[in-house]
Image (cartoon, rainbow, N blue to C red):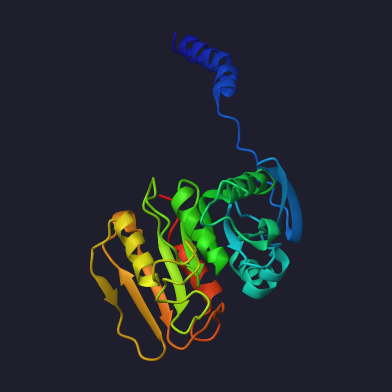
Amino acid sequence: MRLLSVTATLLLLCALSPLARAQAPAPAKACALTAVAGEMHELTSGGRQRTYRLFVPPAIAGRAQLPLVLDLHGSGGNANDRAKASGFEALAAREGFAVATLQAVDARWNVPAASSRPDDVQYVSDVIDHIAARTCIDPARVHATGFSGGGRMSSLLGCRLNQRIASIAPVAGLRWTGPCPGRAIPVFTVHGLADTVNAYEGHADRGAEWVESVPEALAGWATHNRCQPKLLQDKQTGPLQTLRYGGCSNGAEVRLARIDGMGHIWPRAEIDASDAAWQFFKNHPLQ
């Protein structure tokens, strides 16, 4: 009887095993981790042809998904020159993330947004989709930075596209573009006190483009992120000073690196803006 029982059990397991195999989940498809050495790509967004430059580092073996940094040029610039100036591609090769350097129509981003000009928020969303269809991007680690006009545009992305953008790091271009729907978004910005193009004190005679001061813009983001109301300043010597708001919702900190004597540049001396932005991005995935 015991032999018959063991035999029956084995027959039952053999009969069920094909069903068990059929119900088991299929293995996940491998990511298409193809290196891209700074190439221009085209896509259609809003009914017009747009371009962007893509870099995916060659040392990506074994990576399941890569962070993506969106880098936006200043007014009058272009994607190729911006890639050389920021150095994000060399940093990405060392750190293991992808970079998309974006290209505005007629070299100027549509911010403040006007209905008569291309929808650059939609363009950025379309670029993310375009890249995600071609390589292996972590949707929780897409970040935006930019210089001057690109900084203003990355501020707008933090407001209008914060369901896809994890954090922002505008340089010489932080704006408060609210009221903003959606989540609190971490903000890191760098600005020089001697900037005569986008003055730290704001209120330039340029229409809606540069109204509030940098501290006022910072306070707007702090309010959106439900931070504690007091602006804190770290004790530091030298031209670099760090100001920040603490106690923000979901850890969405708001921080400013202010540099005495620095003009309208992407800094490398007192602080390396590219590396500082990346260190900030690493600590702030989408939540």
Quadrant of the drawing holding the N terminus = top left
Does residue 56 appear in the picture of this structure?
no
Above or below, 261 against 233 in this view is: below
x, y percent for residue 161? 49, 48
Above or below, 18 against 79 in this view is: above
Foreground of the two, 58 or 253: 253
x, y percent for residue 135? 67, 49
x, y percent for residue 141? 51, 54
- Residue 146 left/right relative to 159: right
Query: Residue sitting at 69 percent across and 40 percent down?
Result: 47
Query: Residue sitting at 76 percent across and 59 percent down?
Result: 39
- Residue 123 left/right relative to 221: right
Task: Tell how many labels.
Answer: 0
Foreground of the two, 120 or 43: 120
x, y percent for residue 97? 60, 61
Foreground of the two, 180 or 41: 180
Does residue 165 appear in the picture of this structure?
yes
Extreme residue toward the bottom, this view: 238
Above or below, 102 against 126 in this view is: below
